[in-house]
Image (spheres, rainbow, N blue to C red):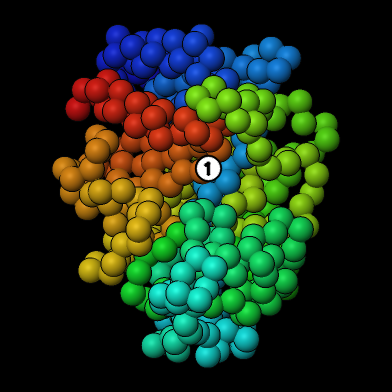
Amino acid sequence: MRSPLDLGFCPTRLAWLAERVGHAVEARHIPGAVMLLARDGEIAFERAWGYRNPADGTPMSSDSVFRLYSMSKPITSVATMMLVERGVWSLDESVHAYVPAFAGLQVGVEVPDPGAPDGRRLMLEPARRDMTLHDLLRHTAGLTYGIFETSLVKAAYLAAGVDSRRQTNQQLLERLAKVPLACQPGETWEYSRATDVLGALIEQVTGRTLGTFLQEEIFTPLGMVDTGFHVPAAQCHRIAEPFANDPDTGEPIKIADARTPPTFEAGGSGLVSTAHDYLRFMQMLANGGALGDVRLLSPHTVRWMTADHLGTIAHGPHYLPGDGYGFGLGFAVRLADGGAAVCGSAGDYYWCGLAGTYAWCDPARRLIGLWMMQAPNQRYAYWALTRNMTYAALLD
């Protein structure tokens, strides 16, 4: 095993990173975290800080299990592309070929209405084109989330139960077919239930539940032994927990249950995993679709997925990839060395999760980074801190 210095990292600067995160734990700004840095397929830095369960003082460990939230999306996106490679479907196909109720969807447009309670009403206009599988992968399908920000379309989502955790994938499709689109398909990047729809379609075309498909086709082949839609009872002691109350706002922290099998196996937000398991997934991508003797994707497909697919498509009002990033097929993709508020390289790609998890791959630097915590409101600060300090420690 090569040392961090042999892998191109300054040990002193990695110690600065470890110390800075340690201070954050001591100050009770975050409960704990796990970080892995890998280069050329070898782990250069591995550290666990703080508490896996801050309520009882159980220390954090590298095998702790985290709720991934939206870091589920890259996995479901890979599953989608595996089916493309097998000829099951093509990205230019209309979604209504698989969900007939999605034909003829309408777009909700807010217009002034002095007689309405909030001075606005929803006018419906026809979609100018069908949403495609390509749109679902790059969040340009016209869908949205009802739980982030407010709008009349989002209110319709909430009223229809689109954001329920107690629905099945089939019920999700039925409910989405009854609410307006938030944008014209293909015209705007809007973070959405699109990856959940992909999960539902995977169930439909494979005849397997999403959890079974992912287990049989991705997790077992890659040796991701601690990844799935819930944590088995015998391993629940390994679940990383947040503080009971947010240290900045004092508000109670609400987080998904990881202990019982869910009714809704949400392709966009439902998985749990460990840092080492997710590293295996990221290393597969970094290797061009293979890990050891297991190949999930062609190198050409990985390059296709991690290229920008937005071009001149408009960004919605809350563009999560951030300045300097486009979006591929499941990942934010850096467009140039500059332009972003965090250090990185043109062509690096990442995604993240609501509770604080973050993964990125920098092909130009042969680098993979994993940051895992369960501290929702602190996520942006520590994603930027740890990423910038990683590059500060990189010597070449």
Tally of marks: 1
Q: Label 1: few (<14), some or many (≥20) within 10 Å?
A: some
Q: Residue at x 76, y 52 (%)?
A: 262
Q: Nearer the viewer, residue 27 or 264?
A: 27
Look at the picture and state if 356 lies above or below 113: above
Q: Residue at x 53, y 14 (%)?
A: 28
Look at the picture and state if 224 lies above or below 394: below
Q: Position of residue 140 (x, y in %)?
A: 40, 70
The answer to which quarter of the image holds residue 392 is top left
Look at the picture and state if 206 lies above or below 263: below
Look at the picture and state if 375 lies above or below 155: above
User: Is residue 116 shown left or right of residue 337?
Assistant: right
Q: Label 1 belongs to which residue?
A: 354
Q: Nearer the viewer, residue 185 or 68?
A: 185
Q: Position of residue 330 (x, y in %)?
A: 44, 58
Q: Residue at x 64, y 50 (%)?
A: 270
User: Is residue 203 shown left or right of residue 222?
Assistant: right
Q: Is residue 322 visible?
A: yes
Indicate the amino acid at tag 1.
Leu
Q: Position of residue 268 (x, y in %)?
A: 57, 56
Q: Residue at x 28, y 51 (%)?
A: 325
Q: Nearer the viewer, residue 226 or 354?
A: 354
Q: Quadrant of the N terminus?
A: top left
As helix, strand or loop, the secondary structure at mark 1 comes to: loop
Q: Is residue 278 visible?
A: no
User: Is residue 150 shown left or right of residue 207?
Assistant: left
Q: Position of residue 156 (x, y in %)?
A: 59, 70
The answer to which quarter of the image holds residue 306 is bottom left
Q: Quadrant of the C terminus?
A: top left
